[in-house]
Image (cartoon, grey):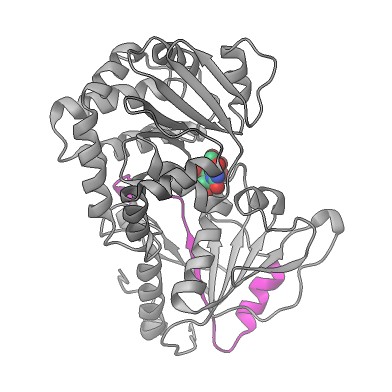
Amino acid sequence: MHITNGMNKPITCDIFCAVIDNFGDIGVCWRLAKQLVHEHDMTVRLWVDDLLSFRRLHPAISPDMQIQHCLGVEIRHWNSTFLELPFPKIEPAQLVIEAFACELPECYVAAIVGQEYKPIWVNLEYLSAEEWVAGCHCLPSPNPSLPITKYFFFPGFTLQTGGLLLERDLIARRDAFQSELHTQAAFWRALDVPLPKPDEVRVSLFCYENIALPELFSIWAKANIPMLCLVPEDCVLPQVAAFFGRELVVAGDTLQHGNLEVRVLPFIAQERYDELLWACDLNFVRGEDSCVRAQWAGKPFVWHIYPQQDKVHIKKLSAFMDLYCSGLQPDATQALYSLWQGWNIEHNGGQAASTSLKTAWDDYWEHIALLQRHAREWSQHLSGNSLVLNLLNFVQKIDRIGSLECKLDLR
Ligand code: TRH
């Protein structure tokens, strides 16, 4: 029988994050940790195996420290195998979050099992708009050999899922930023980027290497309006350099071709990246976390999906486009599909796009006012479904139900 600790609301939490690649895993875990501390007064330990990636999102992180404290969160360097340090003997927290099915240390699991009052153990899953998610959200997974159960918790876009990470004050901060020209001006000045010209289109571009990128740049170079494209320093820079016939580009560089100006930005701290998304007319984003943040920005965006094995991502992309476009006018929907499919062409199972990228871009831009309105309404629509509130409600529910957990629908 699962014995829980009869808590009203958990007070302590351990979050485990193994960074597979890039920044999405730690990006999500860091947001979650901060929200639990700042909005729910919890004591959070965040176990991360890659402090160098973490430091790019939050420059105050020191990559060499086993234990450090940042913005109220205790950060532990986990799995530092090169130092051959064993996992410390600690008492598990009341709420244990394993991010994206990373494997918890054996001795930590043994410590969970050894507790008289067992923690609630949740596996926080990747985000997907696919329908099956609603059926799996909150399902228990009893351990085959140990007297402990973990629960699947799926973020998502509908009320049948766990919702999305959204800080309590984010929408208000976004609205203030977007309505205050002097705040935006200060933001651009701090990035050493000139203020927007009246007729200019300002785009942020965060993507994986993408075979469609040179073509998109050519289209923008021939556009009849000035296009300013801001590219954060990351893996796409060699492609940017190649387009401009350069060996190398680095943060601070400005490159011009026709009506396209590209400015390379440094990789900025996570909070500032939100502001970049709020300040641009259009955002190209990727993976998971930047895609969610682009939705909170209430601005039109184009998603470069993270490629997965067995082409799972193709269904994921379609499921999201279907959901996002429900309620959007058919012409604008078609324009969005064409551009997103063109942008994800190499991940699209080899399927050729039905329209050229040039036509897709022109159609998209023709509908930009509608897409802008839709983006705003979409962010409003999503904002009532907070992942952290759902998670804490769920944890309290399990705790109340206790031993009946395996038989009940806990959603
Ligand atoms: O970096 P990503 O591609 O990350 C992930 C991981 O690859 C992960 O393994 C995979 O499963 C997932 O994608 C789907 O993209 P993502 O998720 O958008 O994360 C980027 C993070 O970096 C996000 O928190 C925003 C942040 N960021 C900054 O803080 N500053 C910046 O300048 C930029 C461009 C991004």
Quadrant, the C terminus: bottom left
> Exactly how many numbered labels are in the figure?
0
Which residue shows up at 22% across the image and 53% down it?
381
The answer to whether residue 326 is above or below residue 227 is: below
Which residue shows up at 61% across the image and 34% down it?
233
Residue 355 in view? no
Q: Is residue 411 left or right of residue 73?
A: left
The answer to whether residue 133 is above or below residue 1 is: above
Magenta residue check for 115: yes
Q: Is residue 59 left or right of residue 374?
A: right
Q: Position of residue 249 (x, y in %)?
A: 65, 23
Q: Residue furthest front?
A: 182
Q: Which portion, as a residue range, is magenta?
A: 106-132
Magenta residue check for 186: no
Q: Position of residue 64 (x, y in %)?
A: 80, 58
Q: Classify residue 115 by image quadrant.
A: bottom right
Q: Position of residue 31 (x, y in %)?
A: 50, 60
Q: Is residue 274 left or right of residue 163?
A: right
Nearest the camera: 225 or 19?
225
The answer to whether residue 264 is above or below residue 290 is: above
Q: Classify residue 240 by image quadrant.
A: top right
Q: Is residue 82 left or right of residue 407?
A: right
Which residue shows up at 51% across the image and 49% down it?
272
Residue 9 in view? yes
Q: Position of residue 337 (x, y in %)?
A: 28, 26
Which residue shows up at 52% across the image and 41% down it?
189
